[in-house]
Amino acid sequence: MTYNPLRYLGEELESLRAQGLFRHPRVLEGRQAAEAVFDHREVINLSSNNYLGLTTHPKLIEAAMAAVERYGAGSGSVRTIAGTMADHVALEEKIARFKHTPAALVFQSGFTANAGTVSCILGKEDVIVSDELNHASIIDGCRLSRAKIAVFKHRDVADLRRVLDETQGHYRRTLVITDGVFSMDGDIAPLPDIVEVAERYEAIIMVDDAHASGVLGQQGRGTVDHFGLHGRVHVQVGTLSKAIGCLGGYVAGSQDLIDYLIHKARPFLFSTSHPPAVTAAAIAAFDLLQEDPSLMERLWDNTRYFKAGLERLGFDTGHSETPITPVIVGDGAKAMAFSDRLFEQGVFAQGIGFPTVPNDKSRVRTIVTATHTREDLDRALAVFEAVGREMGLIAPVGSAR
């Protein structure tokens, strides 16, 4: 019999199958749009991060194609050797102006922007104070830094204060870090209170605005702008992969921060830079954000309409305040079955279970976009209602709630 040291992987996968949690990614056939074809089925797409519909915007496509014609398909090198192109510099200058910071640096993904920055600026003599529901990229960056990790209860400023009291004086530096918008629940960090408390302890303040970029703040500048906190958040992380419609992440902050990351951040140092098409499309996207306010207006009109519809039907949508609206089911297997049944009826809303969320908080996560029509949303709500009643997730018609 052939020796198989990876046999345990198959056993783990069988456990996932037994729990109803095993999934292959659905395959998109065509464009990432409000109505799209996944696994040969045309569905209303409520699973995309394409908040403003920019993945298919003509101006981004035109910019990308022109860049390929002019510069080629790739950059051919890491940024610190031969891979810094003029458009990389132009994009970073545009982001810095957009975020009202002295400088910015583009990373290959939002994940590497978070993980690379946290692991770079902190060390084993420091402490990181992190919201318990922060993104996995923040958690990985914290672990890689070898700093002490202290966790405060989700959005609980009193608990943040308690943790800072307990750690004060025991470490060289303190970093307080939070998501701006939390990706599974759609709630917003109480950033003004977090900043006020962190400042009292002279902590570094870092915000991951991946799901706030292009969604909150003037022209989509994020939670720092939304709350009027410019100059008080030392490290801002954003993404080019969601509302911006492209690929990548960025860090915005002081010139010293950016120069330090250029010399020390391992993902930046050891990954090939963005291809010309992506960089040019991202530049076009930031121009659009500032030129066309109707994009965000439509996004928020659709958000309010769909959220109200789910709540009217009796679904538990948690504490969402943004276009991310979870429909909390509870059991992981039931959440996956709910997602599958919705898909069969023409709505793609991804099931989310453990370990992404606690098993008793398993859900399907919905995200509306600016490009959904009212007809799309009405059809989706009708499917949610039919499947929700069929599975006993909401009360039958005519029964008391």
Image: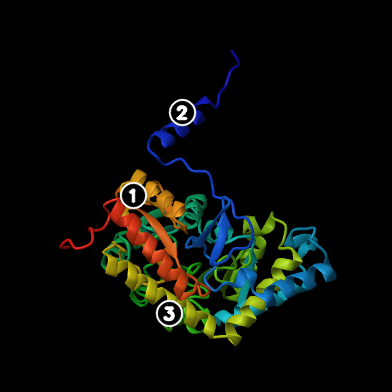
Q: Residues within 10 Å of mark 1 (few under 14, many from 20)?
A: some
Residue annotated with mark 1? 358
Q: Nearer the viewer, residue 67 or 380?
A: 380
Mark 2 to mark 3: distance in Å?
47 Å
Q: Are marks 1 and 3 in contact (CB under 8 Å)?
A: no
Quarter of the rendering containing residue 239: bottom right
Mark nearer the N terminus (2 vs 3): 2
Residue 301: mark in rendering:
3
Badge nearest the viewer, 2 or 3: 3
Q: Is residue 116 visible?
A: no
Tell whether 47 sits left or right of 191.
right
Residue at left 77%, top 63%?
A: 83
Q: Secondary structure at mark 3?
A: helix
Q: Position of residue 203 (x, y in %)?
A: 41, 69
Q: Secondary structure at mark 2?
A: helix
Q: Residues within 10 Å of mark 2 (few under 14, many from 20)?
A: few
Mark 1 to mark 3: distance in Å?
31 Å
Q: Residues within 10 Å of mark 3 (few under 14, many from 20)?
A: some
Q: Residue furthest front?
A: 398
Residue at left 48%, top 68%?
A: 211
Residue annotated with mark 2? 11
Residue at left 40%, top 72%?
A: 322
State the quadrant of the C terminus. bottom left
